[in-house]
Image: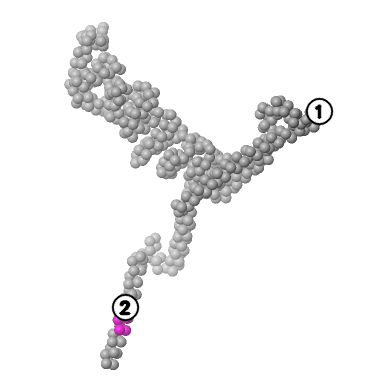
Amino acid sequence: MRLIENNSSKIQLQIDEMKQLRAEYDTKEQYCIYCKDPSKPIPGMTLQESVSLDALTKYLKHLEDKYAEIEQLMSKKYLPAQRKADLNEEMIVVLERRDLAENLNNELQFRHQRLQIISQALTLWVKSDMSRSFQDFMEHIQKSKDLHGEQGIIEELLEDDPGKAKEAEILLYYVERFNELISLGEYEKAVYFAANSPRRILQNIGTVSKFKAVGKTRGKPFPLLLFFEAIFSISHAFKHPVDAELTLEGIKCGLSEKRLDLVINWVTQERLTFSEEAGDVIFDYGEQDTYNKAKCLALAQIIYSECGLHKKALLCLCKQNQIQRAMEYIQQFKDFTSDDLMQLIKLCPHTELIQCLTKEWNGKPPYLSFGLAVLHLFSVDMKKVGIKLLQEINKDGKDAVEHLMINDPFCSLEKWQELANICLQNGFDKLSNDIMSVLRSQAGVTEISEEDDKVNLMQHVFW
């Protein structure tokens, strides 16, 4: 029994030892899953440097500095979503306090002005013979122009307002402090200092020029872009939107930094003042960046529509291939001339667009003549588009051609004759014959021999 117990004890010890070894192995294996293979070379170091203690120490210091820098950037750049909500609530509270303070300030200014008037009236009353009571004297003064109804007196009284001097001191402090931050190279602080300046005293082109002069710093955000982000994001806090000049500069800056996402947010969400130049900048950017062209056209269309530039807004719709919306836009504003629409098909020669413009739309006559449109395309070296239109009408047969010609009030018979010749020159013999056949079938039309040089090719009258 003793022998068996001894053997059992030895076996149990061996089992415990094996369990311990197994646990250590599992721990080591689990750790190695998340560790890099130490046998592999260190990125950026040669084999000789990877076995040098000095080089490794220097590299470790570099990694620690980089880690600290990333940690610092993360703490500045990223904040919890809840923090944004809290800041919005704080901003609402601050704005309410500002409104209350403004109302109180206006009330106090009114009281100050009234007391000044009373004080001046009292002085005049004392200097007079005081034969009348002060109340009667005040009533008399109120009816006179010396203290009532004269803007000069009001301005003179306001000049004595102590609040004006205090406000001037605050504005001067902001300007001096901003210049100091710029000179110290603390551009991010300068950005938010300028954005939150009272009465937008630092939200001007002069500030933009200073940030432009600063330029970019490697590893840090562009101060000018930060400035526009800041002033646009708080634009709702002011009674008036950001002016057109700053809006244009901000859009240019955002696009130059490839931040179309910011520009989209600014145009659609913030309180800005749009201009034709701002729309042109976004439109031109879309022409260069084909991947984002549709987004740029949509943004430019918003700006052009806000500015009442309907021709350019219509062009943006057509370039987005939104033909139905474009036709609705034409019908809505009704101030497009035939020359405007001819220029439109030259800039945006979509077959579907031209077909919609040259056919009835919602029970209304066509906006353009099919014949004149095709002739115009051939005259401006857009032969391919013209031929495509001829191919489409040629498919529909003679009845469609006749319907098109009879319901076209703009194109004269001479122009149809010219179009028939163009069809003949470009291989559309059947279409040319159909056009000539319709012309001959019109009452009062007489064909003149080509040998007679003294008359026109065709004489015609629609009856």
Of pointers 1 and 2, the one earlier in the residue sequence: 2
The kind of residue on which mark 1 rests is: Ser
Residue 212 in view here = no
Above or below for 245 versus 446? below
- Residue annotated with mark 2: 19
Query: Foreground residue, 45 or 194?
Result: 194
The image quarter in which residue 317 lies: top left
Q: Residues within 10 Å of mark 2 (few under 14, many from 20)?
A: few
In the image, what residue occupies the spot 37% across and 39% down? 295
Residue 46 percent coordinates (x, y): 38, 63
- Residue annotated with mark 1: 131
* Left or right of 339 on screen, residue 97: right
* Left or right of 337 on screen, residue 221: right
Q: Which mark is residue 202?
A: none
**What span is in magenta?**
12-16
* Left or right of 112 on screen, residue 35: left
